[in-house]
């Protein structure tokens, strides 16, 4: 009895088309005391989409606020903008025995290209600035992601063409054992 290679081949092609990736490498920089990541870290997103940046520190209260700078692609014609400062709040996360304090900010991304987000960690002590004023920066971290236009019809069309070609090939092979091209079995 001969086994067909078509089912495993179809499963393999499906897995390649539906690749899934999760990246948390940027958050590992928390070992320096400061980190930033986004929910699309190292991934491509379809626009328009909301992106959440998450900044964290283990150096609380030395840094107790964070300000985010959203940097759009140069070719978009948009200017960078800042949000915050946001208070850093305790989380359930710990790094090297220290509690991680986090702040988040969500922005709608609607321009194609490579985006950047910076986190400026700000410091105060007992309501008094640690350095010259309450906007003095204790540390800066950055992350990036890529935005592309959403083309669901293009993806669906490519998948439909692939499956149609596969079905046509199977139908032709079942209808006639002589094809205009050699088929190894």
Image (cartoon, grey):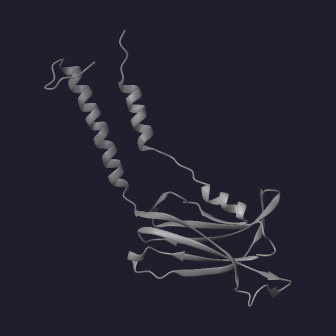
Name the residue: 61% across, 63% down: 37
Number of disc labels? 0
Looking at the picture, does residue 88 appear above or below residue 177? below
Looking at the picture, does residue 44 appear above or below residue 157? below
Residue that protrudes farthest toward the bottom in the picture = 132
Quadrant for the N terminus in the image: top left
Q: Nearer the viewer, residue 157 or 92?
A: 92
Q: In the shown orientation, is residue 120 left or right of residue 10?
A: right
Q: Picture coordinates of residue 36 (x, y %)? A: 64, 66
Name the residue: 79% across, 56% down: 96
Q: Picture coordinates of residue 2 (x, y %)? A: 35, 12
Q: In the shown orientation, is residue 82 left or right of residue 91?
A: left
Q: Quadrant of residue 16?
A: top left
Looking at the picture, does residue 9 appear above or below residue 102? above
Name the residue: 66% across, 61% down: 29
Q: Picture coordinates of residue 69 (x, y %)? A: 58, 77
Q: Nearer the viewer, residue 33 or 14?
A: 33
Q: Picture coordinates of residue 171 (x, y %)? A: 24, 26
Q: Quadrant of residue 134?
A: bottom right
Residue that protrudes farthest toward the left in the picture = 180
């Amino acid at each position: 009895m001969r086994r067909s290679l078509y089912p495993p081949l179809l499963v393999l092609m499906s897995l390649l088309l539906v690749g899934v990736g999760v990246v948390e490498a940027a958050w590992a920089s928390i070992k320096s005391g400061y980190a930033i990541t986004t929910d699309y870290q190292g991934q491509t997103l379809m626009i328009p989409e909301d992106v959440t940046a998450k900044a964290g520190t283990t150096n609380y209260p030395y840094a107790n606020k964070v300000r985010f700078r959203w940097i759009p692609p140069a070719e978009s014609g948009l200017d960078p903008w800042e949000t915050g400062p946001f208070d850093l709040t305790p989380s359930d996360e710990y790094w090297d025995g220290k509690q991680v304090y986090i702040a988040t900010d969500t922005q709608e991304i609607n321009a194609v290209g490579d985006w950047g987000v910076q986190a400026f960690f700000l410091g105060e002590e007992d309501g008094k600035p640690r350095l010259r004023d309450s906007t003095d920066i204790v540390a800066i971290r950055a992350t990036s992601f890529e935005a592309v236009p959403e083309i669901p019809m293009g993806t669906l069309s490519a998948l439909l063409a692939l499956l149609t070609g596969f079905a046509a090939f199977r139908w032709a092979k079942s209808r006639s054992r002589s094809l205009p091209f050699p088929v190894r079995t």
